[in-house]
Image (cartoon, rainbow, N blue to C red):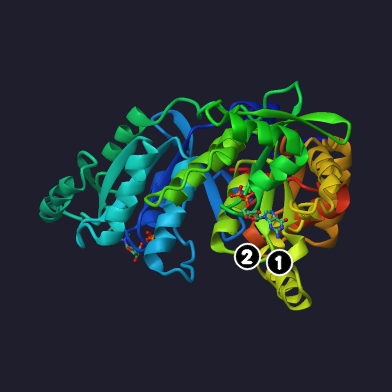
Amino acid sequence: ATQEGFDAEDVEGALEEAGHGPLPVLAVVGRPNVGKSTLVNRILGRREAVVEDRPGVTRDRVTYEAEWAGRRFKVVDTGGWEQDVLGIDASVAAQAEFAIEAADAVVFVVDAAVGATDTDEAVVKLLRRAGKPVVLCANKVDGPSGEADAAMLWSLGLGEPHPVSALHGRGTGDMLDEVLKVLPEAPAQTFGTALGGPRRVALIGRPNVGKSSLLNKTAGEERVVVNEVAGTTRDPVDELIELGGKTWKFVDTAGIRRRVHLTEGADYYASLRTAAALEKAEVAVVLIDVSESISVQDLRIITMAVEAGRALVLAYNKWDTLDDERRFYLEREIERDLVQVQWAPRVNISARTGRHVEKLVPAVETALEGWETRVPTGRLNAFLGEIVAAHPHPVRGGKQPRILFGTQAGTRPPRFVLFASGFLEAGYRRFIERRLREEFGFTGTPLHLSVRVRE
Ligand code: GDP
Ligand code: GDP
């Protein structure tokens, strides 16, 4: 069949991008209303060709493909993120942290007319610690009279503030030139996709959920005693553990076993450790402590695993502590907070008593299987044809965007590219993802869906 307006080169380009040659990622961060979304739209111009939806647990992240001076990169739009119950400062910091973690470079947007606020300062701290290249955008400098406001932002200590009017386009070109100077050609290397050897598992979760207890239970009591007696021997970074007749590599167990209790920045370092473990792992086992309410921190850790594109298993630990009342509320919390990761296999365990710990292995195997599933193009398109016929995209502005065809560009996790005659709304993309899961399983794996629109 002819591919309606797309030629072989389009398809190849999309496959290459989705499957092989990932683009560097630029995150645009800042307080609400400083003009992030306006700036992202300005950067994209009309070339809103690829949209990648990465459903998170607490919000969706939208990534666009952009091009400047002949170089392509991705832009993560953090505008439009909802504020959460923690209040605006905490929410901005958390959002910025996610975006910065996933980025190769950052544009930090400040409203020059307002000047630097405490929230801005909080983000600056995160930027310093993350050590990613930063370009400071002094936005809302609509004319020469605003240049002095921009100069005030030298005080943030992030180098030269670039006066910009995202609204009118003033100064955005110069700023983008600056961005290209600091943005690497290709994203940072990750190890998560390397093949061969024992399967790599990251055991993650907030402090005190029972990570080291579970590790001890699975690794056997004996060696733990040895470690404690030895005291000074350095813990191995990764540990090979025999489970269910197979050898598994638990990555970064040193971070679990070494119990550092920092007061200052403890959360930050815990989150760095989690990120480092995820980088090396193929599958994440996230521990949740059922004796306490599911917290924002739990959701953040799950989101990190999903965004890292790892297979996911949710292990509800301390099951021995549950009474009927707590159990009732727990199920409510799961329904309320974790619907977005319903696809992850769930095990209810007790690291203390050993209850159902053996069920972890089949859950991990199922998740890895979903992570590596490949749907043949013919089957995928037969399926897409059916759902598009039965549930067409809603008509918008007199037009009806249609999915023309699709292909799976990669696995680990599965990545799909859909070719469409128009922009597909987020709701519809999510519907497609849901149907893909119903049809093909994909238990325990995030799915990436990108849409390429015929221009
Ligand atoms: P976000 O919350 O950071 O994504 O901010 P938005 O992009 O939604 O912008 C917030 C408000 O600031 C909107 O009303 C924009 O029109 C306005 N705005 C954004 N950039 C500029 C600018 O360069 N100059 C002026 N005067 N207003 C701007
Ligand atoms: P980590 O910080 O995630 O490594 O957590 P630990 O393994 O150090 O566990 C924190 C506390 O929870 C310790 O007091 C453990 O004894 C306790 N704990 C861990 N797993 C369980 C469990 O399954 N049931 C109960 N009742 N307590 C547990």
Q: Is residue 289 left or right of residue 104?
A: right
Quadrant of ligand 1 in image: bottom left
Instruction: Tell me if residue 119 can be seen.
Output: yes
Q: Is residue 450 left or right of residue 373?
A: left
- The reply to whether the C-beta atoms of the residues labelled 2 and 1 are less than 8 Å apart is yes
Dot 1 lies on which element?
helix
Give amino acid for label 2: Ile
Q: Is residue 442 left or right of residue 287?
A: right
User: Looking at this rendering, what residue extends furthest in the front direction?
Assistant: 229
Residue 222 at x, y = what percent?
74, 34
Using the image as rendered, state which of residue 284 and residue 94 is in the foreground.
Answer: 284
Q: Is residue 289 above or below residue 385?
A: below
Q: Nearer the viewer, mark 2 or mark 1?
A: 2
Residue appearing at x 64%, y 34% in the figure = 18
Residue appearing at x 55%, y 62% in the figure = 296
The crowding category of the residue bearing disc 1, from other C-alpha atoms within 10 Å (few below 14, some 14 to 19, many at least 20), is: some
The crowding category of the residue bearing disc 2, from other C-alpha atoms within 10 Å (few below 14, some 14 to 19, many at least 20), is: some
Residue 245 at x, y = what percent?
89, 31
Residue 334 badge: 1
| Number of numbered callouts drawn | 2
Residue 434 at x, y = what percent?
77, 56
Dot 2 lies on which element?
loop
Using the image as rendered, state which of residue 93 and residue 215 is in the foreground.
Answer: 215
Mark 2 vs 1, N-terminal side: 2
- Give the CA separation, mark 2 to mark 1: 8 Å
Residue 432 at x, y = what percent?
75, 54
Quarter of the image with the C terminus is: top right
Instruction: Tell me if residue 418 can be seen.
Output: no
Q: Which residue is mark 2?
A: 294
Give amino acid for label 1: Ile
